[in-house]
């Protein structure tokens, strides 16, 4: 079992627990941190340097007691917000009849995927070294499609 296998399970929405067979120690945290470190070292920067610096500071201060709860709550809000945004786009409403709605929905999905870096169970299909270029291309596509939608809406 490789780190990529473990990361794939997590992206698929599965919970993982890694136990050392000899000692019985739970190694899950160490492996998850290693997966994050590998992604960051390959240029897949999700965590800004300021955030990493604050995390290091929190280990040396009294803030360690609130940081885990804050991070958990923040990611929960991110997941809920993403779920609600996608739900609002899929619920039957009058906007679905609007010209260009499907294109706008696809743009929103691409935007959420780019912003969350594939969190929420989606698996990136590109190679890690091409993700930055692909994200920039996606952003340019979204901008041009948004301009087209705005033009169509102004004509209505």
Image (cartoon, grey):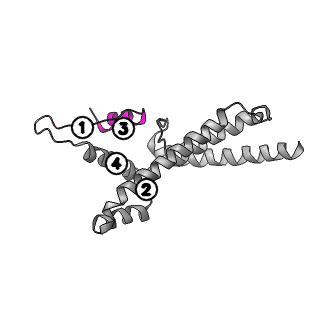
In the rendered image, which residue does mark 1 sit on? 18
Q: Residue at x 79, y 35 (%)?
A: 98
Kindly report the distance in space between the C-alpha atoms of the residues bearing marks 4 and 1: 18 Å
Rendered view: 65 above or below 31: below
Residue 43 rendering spot, x and y as whole percentages: 43, 52
Density class for disc 3 (Cα within 10 Å; few <14, some 14-19, many ≥20) is some
Dot 3 falls on a residue whose secondary structure is helix
Q: Residue at x 38, y 54 (%)?
A: 69
Q: Residue at x 29, y 64 (%)?
A: 59
In the rendered image, which residue does mark 4 sit on? 38
In the rendered image, which residue does mark 3 sit on? 7
Residue 8 rendering spot, x and y as whole percentages: 38, 34
Magenta-tinted stretch: 1-20
Density class for disc 4 (Cα within 10 Å; few <14, some 14-19, many ≥20) is some
Q: Residue at x 26, y 32 (%)?
A: 1
Q: Earlier in the sequence, mark 3 or mark 1?
A: 3
Q: Earlier in the sequence, mark 4 or mark 1?
A: 1
Kindly report the distance in space between the C-alpha atoms of the residues bearing marks 2 and 3: 17 Å
Dot 2 falls on a residue whose secondary structure is loop
Please indicate, yes or no, whether residue 43 appears anywhere in the rendered image. Answer: no
Q: Is residue 136 left or right of residue 98?
A: left
Q: Is residue 90 left or right of residue 98?
A: left
Kindly report the distance in space between the C-alpha atoms of the residues bearing marks 2 and 1: 24 Å
Can you tell which mark lies on residue 65?
none
In the rendered image, which residue does mark 2 sit on? 47
Label 4 or label 2, whichever lies nearer to me, is 2
Please indicate, yes or no, whether residue 2 appears anywhere in the rendered image. Answer: yes
Q: Is residue 63 left or right of residue 88?
A: left
Residue 72 rendering spot, x and y as whole percentages: 41, 50
Density class for disc 1 (Cα within 10 Å; few <14, some 14-19, many ≥20) is some
Q: Earlier in the sequence, mark 2 or mark 1?
A: 1
Q: Earlier in the sequence, mark 4 or mark 2?
A: 4
């Amino acid at each position: 079992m490789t780190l990529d296998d473990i990361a794939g399970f997590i992206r698929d929405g599965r919970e993982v627990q890694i136990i050392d067979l000899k000692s019985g120690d739970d190694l899950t945290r160490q492996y998850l941190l290693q997966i994050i470190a590998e992604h960051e070292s390959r240029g897949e920067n999700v965590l800004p340097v300021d955030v990493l610096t604050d995390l290091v500071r929190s280990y040396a201060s009294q803030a360690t007691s609130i940081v885990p709860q804050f991070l958990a709550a923040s990611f929960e809000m991110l997941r809920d917000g993403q779920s609600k945004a996608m739900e609002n786009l899929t619920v039957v409403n009058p906007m679905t009849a609007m010209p260009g709605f499907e294109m706008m929905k696809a743009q929103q999905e691409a935007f959420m995927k780019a912003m969350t870096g594939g969190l929420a169970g989606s698996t990136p299909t590109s190679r890690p070294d091409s993700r930055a270029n692909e994200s920039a291309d996606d952003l340019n596509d979204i901008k041009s499609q948004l301009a087209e939608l705005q033009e169509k809406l102004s004509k209505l």
